[in-house]
Every structure is written in structure tokens, then in C-alpha cells.
Image (spheres, rainbow, N blue to C red):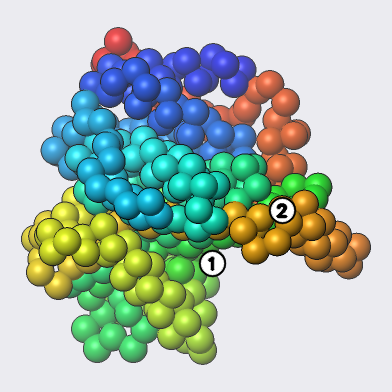
Amino acid sequence: MIEISELTDRVRGVVRALGAPAEVATEVADHLVRAELSGHASHGVLRLPQYAAEIERGLIVAGARAEVVSATPAAIVVDGHHGFGHHAAALATEEAAVAAERLGVAAATVRRSTHIGRLGEYAERLAARGLVALVQVGAAGPGVGSMAPFGSGSGRPFLNTNPWSVGVPAADGAIVFDGSMSTIAEGKVHAAKRTGDPLPEGAVLTADGRPGTGPEDFYADGTLTPLGGALAGHKGYGLALAAALLGGLAHADGSAASLRGLARLRGPDEDPAGLGSVTIIALDPGAFGERDAYAATTGRVAAALRADGVLVPGDLERRSRAEAGTSVALPPGTLAELAALETSLL
């Protein structure tokens, strides 16, 4: 076990040493540690070696700061400048929240983003302010991402996992859904590679389109399968494509969609058929009636589900954070990688 404060300081130190400004390093560290506390190690500290490698390859510009480059009262465009995506998404979340609290509804989109971490984090932030949140990140195009479209004749990747998150304020804790549109998230494959665990049946395909059994099948040019599998994969495919199209609002000005750092690319960075990025929509229930009345109603729905023995989206994360207390357990491999980064950078 390691104390949360110590782990946060160590992660912040590594991100600073990688070249990030202080406020960016703080955002990244807080995000990664909170992912660990929420039970999502796949989006936690084990991502640091990935980010370090992407900085070395020029996919992430460590010193970049996100900025608002265009805004109307209800629509904000943030340019991430290929910096740490967590910082860009946090800025977009704050901008959307402030505008929605003023107008009732607002949206912010991020161009030139990189990996933004756990989407549920941003939905939780908006729900904590009493706002309804729709958060998505998506990328699509020839050779983009890790998932082939449902019914693809080539079996080539065209979509990232393109997750969605929806946050709804409710009495006794926000309802927060966060899930990828592939059968399993790529981060889960990453984590399984680390632990040696098998993957669920039907989660991945090998490079020649056969069912895969382990992370090695995926990383040898394999693909993830769309949510819904052989029976209903068209649904996961459709939602994944929609995420990319909504993310494409970041490039509604006609600018090229640069996807480096946001998705795995097996083709040019700015393919004219490529599209995607991050879009965050915030709605104020008070603009439709009363905030407290809405939260009470959604809370009753959640209570009825729990009374039937059903977990409500967001319950597992709250439980994980409550049980963690002031410390968190990291796998030995993750601790070793953190120490190695500290040795090489500090």
C-alpha cells in the first residue's frame, strides 16, 4: 500500500520531469491517482510509461497548455495543442459547466487532444455541480484505432474504442455510466498483458480475423470487437461511429483532424477521411424545472434499483474510493515502472 498523498506527489514529479507545466502535472497526477482509487487501474498510474514513450515519439507535447480558441455563449472550442489530454478535457469541462450554469445548456469540444484518461472523471465533476453530463471521445478513419467496424470485409481497424460517459445528479450519489463501445476497453487489454490474465471470449480478433484468446493476439495487429458481439455488434459500431462524429465538432471549421496521441494510427495522421476528438455537453436541470426535484426523482430511480440488488452506475467507483481510505494498492509492476521513471528523470 502507498499513501495517496505520496503517490500523487511522485506522479506529479514524474510528469513535471517529462516537461509538463506545474498546473498540467497536477491535473494529470490527480486524474491518474483518482482512477486508481476508483478501481480503474487500466486508466491509472500504469499509463505513465505510455505517456513517456509518446512524448519521446512526438505524439504528446509535454509543455503544451490547452486554451480556448473560440467561444459563443453556449459553444466553446478548446485547442489542446497535443499536450496532455487530461488538462485539455478538464478545461473544456469547466468551460462547459460555467456556460451551462448561465444558459441552461452548453457544449465544449477539444481539437488536437491526446488521451484524456477516464471519461467518468469529467462526468462526475459535472454531476457534482448539479449538471447532467454527456462526455465522449472518438476517432475514426482508415487504419485508426483498434476496432474494425461491424460487418467489415477487410477486418482493418477504423474506430477507436470511442467511449461514452453520462453523468446525472441524484440524491445519495450521482449516476455515472462510463463505457467503451468495444466489447472490452483497450486499457483492459493493457492491464491483462501486465497481469497475464486471459481475455473474455469474443473480445478480440487476431490479425487474420480469427477469435483471439489473449493480449498477444491483439498486440500482433489484432482488433477489438464492437460491443454487442456477433449478434448485436452493429449497436456498438454505431455508437462508436457517433462518438467520432460528435468529436468531429472540434473540426467544424474545416481544419484537419489530427489524431496523433488520441488513437492508434496505422496510416497518416491527417487522413482526409479521419475525424474525431472530444466533446462535452452540460445541461442544467434547473433550466427545465427544479434542480432539487430532478435529483430527488433520479435518486428514487437509483434507490429502486438498489432495492432489487442491482448496482447503479457509479456505485462501484464510490465504493472503491470509500474503501481505499488514505492509501491505495498498486501492482508491483506498476510501482517498479514508476520507480524506473523516477530514476531516469529525477
**To which residue does mark 2 refer?**
291
Q: Name the quarter where the C terminus is drawn.
A: top left
Q: Nearer the viewer, mark 1 or mark 2?
A: 2
**To which residue does mark 1 refer?**
200
Graded by Cα atoms within 10 Å as few (under 14), some (14 to 19) or many (20 or more), the crowding at tag 1 reads few
Report the disc number at residue 28.
none
Q: Amino acid at mark 2?
A: Arg
Say left or right for 77 vs 181.
Answer: left
Residue closest to the eye, 176 or 205: 176
| Secondary structure under the numbered disc 2 in the rendered image | helix
In this rendering, does residue 145 appear at all? no
Q: Amino acid at mark 1?
A: Pro
Compared with 345, 241 (above or below) is: below
Q: Residue furthest right?
A: 307
Query: Residue 314: where, in percent of width, then height?
Result: 67, 52
Query: Residue 257: where, in percent of width, then height?
Result: 17, 59
Compared with 243, 82 (above or below) is: above
Image quadrant assignment for residue 303: bottom right
Compared with 168, 5 (above or below) is: above
